[in-house]
Amino acid sequence: MQNKHTLLITAILLFAAFGFGQTYVSGDVSGIWEASGNPYYVTDNVNVPSGEELRIKAGCEIIFLGWFGIFVDSLASFKAIGTEEDTILFTAEDTVLTRTTGGHLGVSLNNASPSCSLLYCEMEYGRGGRDEYWNIHKRGTLLAAYCSSLVVANCKFSRCKLYTHGLPDESGRGAAVSIAVSDSLILKDCVVYDNYSDDSGGGIAISDCEDLNVSDNYFCSNIALRTGGGQ
């Protein structure tokens, strides 16, 4: 009887430890995400409002339950800082990507606050295309435009796809990472592999940027049907 009680108590403790940790997020969000809230299920687009900050700590797992993204408003701050032993994962529930289904929209920084950063993050199964909800042309699982002093280091970008059907020609750039009209950018020690674009930039695309430090990145098995398999 004592063994049965012990097993029952153990089961209850395990359920308490693993059954209530999940967190559902959508809409306006700021503050700190801790690994204790894992997994973070994104049920609709997440927006970091102007003047606010979202900080994601080491060990967090972010799972997009649909074609949603994290959008960082003008002068908002975004910091996702993992460690070598405890990375931050951004992934999709539906990992079968087609032109119209699967994947997620990743993270978009548009004129965000200076010094946003992503360190030791893993982004996988992003899908670029047209986002009717936000009425934007989405490219790059990590998209940054009009940003300053952005740091992306020791990150992995894999299995992302960009389908340009329905996009203007100039939008089809960068399946995994797309950075434009930004300055003082650091992109280093990243691994970019197994990404696909039916236009240009199978891995990454950088345009109209100044003062760049792009170094020691590894590219493998990226495909672009027009130009720039890796970049």
Image (cartoon, helix red, strand yellow):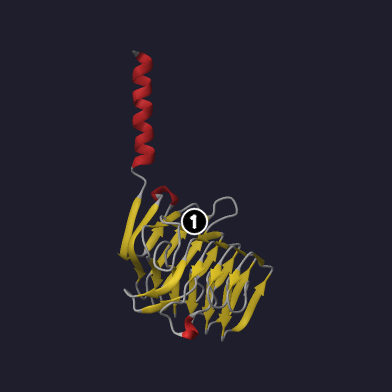
Total count of labels: 1
Side of 56 where 191 appears, left or right = right
Foreground residue among 90 and 16: 90
Quadrant for the C terminus in the image? bottom right
Q: Which residue is mark 1?
A: 89
Position of 225 relative to 34 (above/below): below
Q: Nearer the viewer, residue 230 or 212?
A: 230
Extreme residue in the right direction? 216
Is residue 85 toward the left or the right of residue 45 in the image? right
Q: Residue at x 38, y 79 (%)?
A: 136
Q: Secondary structure at mark 1?
A: strand
- Indicate whether 96 appears above or below 223: above
Going 55% across and 68% down the picture, which residue do you hit? 196
Q: Position of residue 99 (x, y in %)?
A: 43, 68
* Above or below for 33 versus 77: above
Rendered position, 176 above or below 35: below
Classed neighbour count for the residue bearing mark 1: other residues with Cα under 10 Å, few (<14), some (14–19), many (≥20): many
Side of 122 where 102 appears, left or right: left
Quadrant in the picture for residue 167: bottom left
Q: Return the x and y of residue 226 as percentages of the image width and height.
A: 58, 79
Q: Nearer the viewer, residue 174 or 213?
A: 174
Q: Residue furthest top?
A: 1
Picture quadrant of residue 96: bottom left
- x and y percent of residue 190 in the render? 62, 65
In the visual, does 24 lie left or right of 139? left
Task: Residue 97: name its quadrant.
Answer: bottom left
The N terminus sits in image quarter: top left
Residue type for callout 1: Leu
**Residue at the spot x=69%, y=68% of the render?**
216
